[in-house]
Image (cartoon, rainbow, N blue to C red):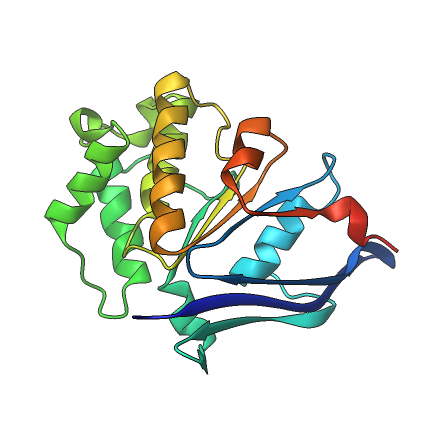
Amino acid sequence: MTSFSVISEDLSKKYSGKTIFAGLNFRLNKGESAVITGRNGSGKSTLMKIISGLISPSTGKMKFIKNEVELEKDFIKTNMGFVSPYLNLYDELTALENLRLFSALKSRSGNYDDEKLKSYLQLVGLYDRRNDEIKAYSSGMKQKLKISFSLLHEPALLMMDEPRSNLDRDGISIIENIAMKQKENGILIIATNDEDDLKLCDLKINIEDHKK
């Protein structure tokens, strides 16, 4: 059986001399989940970006361990899915074209499985609109498409930053089902203050507890 762990070692982040958080340590193993909470502007998204490798911490380190071996950064990207409000979509492309592009960029080989991409769109309820340009999508539909991006290559680590944003009841149900499945097969990290999301996770990381 494959083992996988995400480890935070004494993380801190400063902007313009101001400490956003400091002394942050946690470990998540396969089958475990965490929720990152805190007031708006407290640093939830900053921590998510550090975990995903989009930005670097001021001090400390993120480690990703697979079968007792620390993974290289490029390998991590192919094993991570990220739902975030700052993911940019290409409005002039269709949903399927966007998925093809992101899948090719994420794959080491540059290839993609068209039938699998269509299955992701089916899962989030966008299959019938797969050939529509994104500029015709509502904000909720765009959020669902971002969710489908996060599932590419069945990530060992799935990260969701405010995943319920702009979603209707059906969309929220989709998010919850994906989260529960991820908890069974990998590691889940959610940044949110939503009470229902808090109930989904095992570990609570409150940014407010890590300010100095």
Front one among 178 and 125: 178
Percent of width and height locating residue 29: 48, 63
Q: Is residue 67 above or below residue 180?
A: below
Residue extending furthest toward the left: 115
Q: Is residue 17 above or below residue 126?
A: below
Pinpoint residue 88: horizontal percent, then vertical percent.
44, 42
Outermost residue, bottom side: 69
Image quadrant holding the C terminus, namely: bottom right
Task: Residue 141: give x, y in percent of width and height.
Answer: 35, 26
x 80%, y 49%: residue: 209
Residue drawn at x 64%, y 53% is 47
Q: Nearer the viewer, residue 69 or 91?
A: 69
Could you say which quadrant of the image residue 42 lies in? top right
Residue at the outermost top position: 169
Above or below residue 108? Residue 211 is: above
Q: Residue at x 60, y 36 (%)?
A: 192
User: Looking at the picture, how far across and down is residue 134, in whole percent?
Assistant: 32, 30
Res 94 visible? no
Is residue 69 in view from this perspective? yes
Q: For residue 25, what is the image quadrant?
A: bottom right
Figure check: 180 above or below 114: above
